[in-house]
Image (cartoon, grey):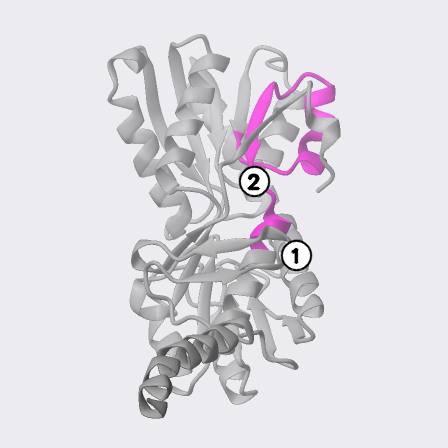
């Protein structure tokens, strides 16, 4: 009889132990987590990195931001090597190139450093998780849907991108081109994809060049915060102000003046600070052994709540917001 009671009690005891283990699976203290942006001085990257540092502070970790001043394909390599030497617990990187950094990130992973990409992904073998702003397809298609509304469903437009190798930009542009195949966009034509290399002055000059090369151009879509502000700055002092459409992805604080003075009617973005915040929590959960990056795993991300790992280690922040004169003053980032 006593033996039967013991046997019956064992599953209950085991369940209780498993439950206690799950409840106690917290984030380790004093984790060293380094953010490696595309460019150290990119306004969007600064906001995203600050969101990451906020999360690391909340978790009792040690955060730092290091990175290049240019967005070259291999400019992040030396920083990865240094972070490996410093034995960081995790590296959170917005990749300038999908492949150039992979051998070095694999080296980091081989030494037990967890790697998370955010904003701009690498090839999957370079990381455990990719924290994406929103579904790439919805971002790309959404840009065309917004453009169509702004230009009345017809006309020529150009894309002012970042660098030719930027993974996120290229993926969004691919989905823009897919969306353009729909019958309702038959009168909209993409005439050129130009590259401002995420440099303000080069993006400004590229905008000027596009208007000169394509006299019938009605709009520029810049899916980069550097590009959209540079294009808006050029148009704001041009005779085309008020008739030419500038849209894309930008921050409210950066674009507010252009919306107020009538240069820009509407644009889109998510909160980059929240993106960095989510990436930091993902990295900390990996480094604490709470998750491995497998599809279906869940983790707690502070004020953003529970998140689920999707296919190929992708975690999505949420849908982008459209900003215009009616709501831009409600946001401060």
> What's the residue at 35%, 60% (across, down)?
313
- Image coords of residue 246 (percent x, y): 55, 24
Give the Cα distance between marks 2 and 1: 13 Å
Task: Name the secondary structure under disc 2.
Answer: loop
Residue corresponding to mark 2:
270
Q: Is residue 234 above or below residue 133?
A: above
Task: Name the secondary structure under disc 1.
Answer: helix
Of the pair 108 and 101, the residue shown nearer to us: 108
Number of numbered markers = 2
The local crowd at label 2, few if under 14, some if 14 to 19, many if 20 or more residues have their Cα within 10 Å, is: many
Is residue 41 shown left or right of residue 183? right
- Image coords of residue 275 (percent x, y): 56, 52
Residue corresponding to mark 1:
51
> What's the residue at 52%, 59% (across, down)?
38
Q: Is residue 44 above or below residue 28?
A: above
Of the pair 6 and 128, the residue shown nearer to us: 6
Residue extent of the magenta highlight? 248-276
- Image coords of residue 267 (percent x, y): 56, 27
Residue 189 in which image quadrant: top left
The local crowd at label 1, few if under 14, some if 14 to 19, many if 20 or more residues have their Cα within 10 Å, is: many
Q: Quadrant of the C terminus?
A: top right
- Image coords of residue 164 (percent x, y): 38, 48
Of the pair 233 and 315, the residue shown nearer to us: 315
> What's the residue at 61%, 70% (across, down)?
66
Q: Is residue 69 magenta?
A: no
């Amino acid at each position: 009889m006593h033996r039967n009671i013991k046997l019956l009690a064992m599953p209950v005891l085991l369940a209780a132990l498993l439950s206690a283990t799950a409840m106690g699976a917290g984030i380790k203290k004093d984790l060293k987590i380094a953010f490696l942006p595309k460019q150290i001085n990119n306004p969007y990257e600064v906001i995203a990195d600050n969101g990451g540092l906020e999360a690391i502070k909340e978790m009792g970790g040690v955060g730092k931001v290091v990175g290049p001043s240019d967005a070259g394909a291999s400019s992040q390599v030396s920083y990865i090597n240094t972070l490996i030497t410093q034995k960081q617990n995790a590296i959170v990187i917005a990749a300038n190139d999908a492949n150039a950094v992979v051998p070095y990130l694999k080296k980091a992973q081989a030494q037990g450093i967890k790697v998370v990409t955010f904003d701009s992904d690498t090839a999957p073998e370079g990381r455990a998780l990719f924290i994406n702003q929103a579904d790439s397809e919805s971002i790309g298609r959404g840009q065309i849907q917004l453009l169509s509304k702004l230009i009345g469903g017809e006309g020529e437009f150009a894309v002012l991108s970042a660098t030719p190798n930027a993974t996120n930009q290229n993926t969004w542009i691919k989905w823009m081109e897919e969306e353009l195949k729909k019958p309702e966009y038959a009168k909209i034509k993409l005439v050129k994809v130009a590259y401002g290399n995420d440099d303000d002055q080069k993006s400004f000059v590229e905008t000027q060049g596009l208007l000169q090369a394509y006299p019938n151009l009605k709009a520029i879509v810049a899916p980069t915060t550097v590009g959209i502000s540079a294009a808006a700055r050029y148009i704001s002092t041009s005779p085309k102000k008020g008739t030419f459409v500038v849209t894309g992805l930008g921050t409210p604080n950066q674009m507010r003046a252009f919306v107020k003075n009538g240069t820009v009617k509407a644009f889109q973005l998510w909160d980059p600070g929240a993106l960095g915040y989510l990436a930091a929590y993902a990295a900390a959960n990996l480094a604490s052994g709470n998750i491995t990056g497998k599809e279906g795993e869940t983790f707690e991300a502070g004020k953003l709540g529970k998140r689920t790992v999707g296919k190929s280690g992708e975690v999505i922040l949420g849908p982008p917001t459209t900003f215009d004169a009616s709501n831009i003053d409600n946001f401060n980032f």
